[in-house]
């Protein structure tokens, strides 16, 4: 199974929109309507990147990040939030979010963020010891 980006939102219209933007740009996509569903999908699939709502009453994006990263510390997250609560945004970044995009989310901003994170994850990692010649 090819690694996919997981799009998580309880709002069906927004979830469909974000998923379509990413599919159109060539990314394999899976969708989840809740944190519980997203955690279940993470247990059974390969999702190096998750795009998730941050401030929905039906979905706690910070708890989603924490739950997934307990078993998959390498998982990356782009969280989408209204910016109404700075404390929640800071908590998401401390929990390990790679990027935070304000809502309403612009198509170009989402695609740029996902591309940057996926490209960085796909890049070969070099260690410092390989770069030093003693």
Image (tube, grey):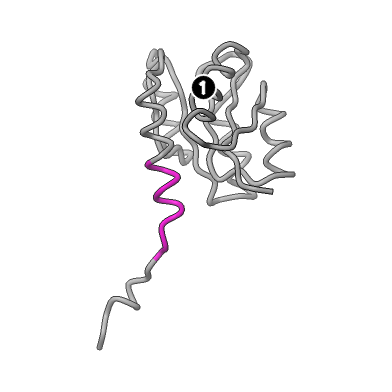
Q: Nearer the viewer, residue 21 or 65?
A: 21
Identify the image quadrant of residue 131.
bottom left
The location of residue 104, given as percent across then percent down, is 40, 13
Measuring 43% from the left and 36% from the top, which residue is drawn there? 114
Measuring 58% from the left and 24% from the top, which residue is drawn there? 60
Identify the image quadrant of residue 81.
top left
Image height check: is 112 above or below 130? Answer: above
Q: Is residue 83 magenta?
A: no
Magenta segment boundaries in residue numbering: 116-125
45 left or right, relative to 54: right
The location of residue 52, given as percent across then percent down, is 54, 27
Instruction: Classify 10 Å Cα crowding around label 1: few (below 14), some (14-19), many (20 and above).
Output: many
The location of residue 41, given as percent across then percent down, is 71, 37
Measuring 63% from the left and 39% from the top, which residue is drawn there? 67
Q: Main secondary structure of the magenta part?
A: helix
101 left or right, relative to 73: left
**Image quarter hosting the C terminus:** bottom left
Q: Nearer the viewer, residue 24 or 22?
A: 24
């Amino acid at each position: 199974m090819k690694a996919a980006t997981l799009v998580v939102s309880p709002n069906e219209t927004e979830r469909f929109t974000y998923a379509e933007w990413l599919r159109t740009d060539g990314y394999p996509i899976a969708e989840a309507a809740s944190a519980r569903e997203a955690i279940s999908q993470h247990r059974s699939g390969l999702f190096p990147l998750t795009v998730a709502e941050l401030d929905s009453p039906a979905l706690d994006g910070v708890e989603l990040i924490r739950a997934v990263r307990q078993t998959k510390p390498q998982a990356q997250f782009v969280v989408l939030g209204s910016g109404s609560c700075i404390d929640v945004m800071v908590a998401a970044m401390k929990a390990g979010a790679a990027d935070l995009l304000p809502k309403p989310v612009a198509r170009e901003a989402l695609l740029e963020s996902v591309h940057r994170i996926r490209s960085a994850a796909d890049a070969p990692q070099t260690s410092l010891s390989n770069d030093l010649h003693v």
